[in-house]
Amino acid sequence: MKISIALAAMLFCCTAAMAQNASTQTVAAQPPAQPPMPVVTLPSPLPATLAELVPAITAKVSTANVEFAIADLADPQHPVFAGFNETIPIYPASVIKVPILVAAYTKAENDPAFLEQVVTIEHKNFTETWDPLAENGIHDPDPAIREGDKLKVSFLLHVMISRSDNIATNTMIDLLGRPNINALMEKLGYEKTRVYRKVYGETPLDDPEEAHWSDRSNIFPPGEAVRMLAEIYAGKIASPASCKAMMSPLLNQLDRELVAAVLPKDAVYAGKTGETSKVLHDIDIVTGPHRRYALAVYTNHHDRPARVIDIHMVGAMVDAYFTAQYEK
């Protein structure tokens, strides 16, 4: 027997009280509107343990093209992890912006004026970047970045996540320094996560320094991505205040097409998506009644609709599993 995700949400999410919040959780003032919930059929009965959930998911998706990692955050200080091919790097696309966010707030702890520092936007960092309104009809309350603009670091960090702004990201990479970001990742115990390249669209950047990194690719495997989100949520990767500040742009990310699209209305999504012509990813923290977990789903189908379907399936199964656990 199969049930729809909408029915699963009704069964599992209608009666219990709000789960206890970790110290770093905050609330988006006006979260972006979610698209209509896709119809995703779930296996019945649902898996009873996290160990059973992983093979149940792999039976429903294209395992040659999907990797994922899950963190149970019922006890945020002692998360429980599981995953499938979660240590194997796939090009991370824009989810690499989360380690940059961590590096910036870590720097701000030693330099309190850093977030208020004003930066001039340079031509070398200009590239195509997502326009939520023009491309998807999504209202973006923040102005577009123009060459020569003088902007605060805090604004650049916000739009780097909320609308995945590539110009803001490249400016932050220059400001922080790639070696410094990577040294921090190593210090924090992220063995594979590295920022080597700036991000750009179809037109290459007019930045001579990029040639020095042309033989490298950014690395952020799903296992390390979900661990990073878990440590942000628990207030462990930096100070609790810094972690709470990092949650704000994640809560306000405008792209709600993937995991957020299969969540019931009472679920709170905080995440980052990433996409190129070959990959599609979503890393997120999901909280609310009956649920508290982190999830990273990476796909590398050439067929975009197939990528979306796989991410919807993983997101729906994981959310249904956790809501069922809280019901017990």
Image (spheres, grey):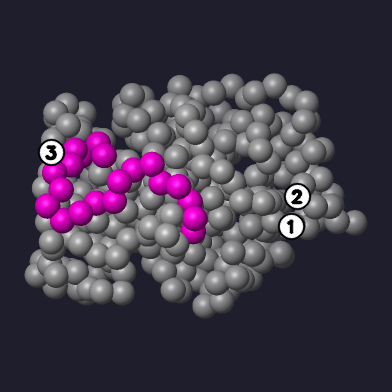
Pointers 2 and 1 in contact (C-beta within 8 Å)? yes
Q: Which residues are magenta?
A: 136-155
What's under tag 3, amino acid-wise? Val
Q: Circle 2 sits on which residue?
A: 5
What's under tag 1, amino acid-wise? Val
Residue displayed at 38% across by 50% down:
163
Is 150 covered by the magenta stretch?
A: yes
Q: Circle 3 sits on which residue?
A: 118
Is most of the magenta stretch helix, strand or loop?
A: loop
Above or below, 71 relative to 66: above
User: Is residue 31 in sight in this rendering?
Assistant: yes
Q: Residue furthest right?
A: 1
Above or below, 236 relative to 5: above
Query: Foreground residue, 201 or 211?
Result: 201
Query: Foreground residue, 171 or 36?
Result: 36
Quadrant where the C terminus is found in the figure: top right
Circle 2 crowding by C-alpha within 10 Å: few under 14, some 14–19, many from 20? many
Q: Circle 1 sits on which residue?
A: 40
Residue 322 is situated, as x and y percent measured from the top left of the image, at 68, 39
Question: Mark 2 or mark 3, which is nearer to you?
Answer: 3
Q: Is residue 213 left or right of residue 17?
A: left
Pointers 3 and 1 in contact (C-beta within 8 Å)? no
The residues tagged by marks 2 and 1 sit, at their Cα atoms, a distance apart of 6 Å
Secondary structure beneath dot 3 equals strand
Residue 167 is situated, as x and y percent measured from the top left of the image, at 24, 56
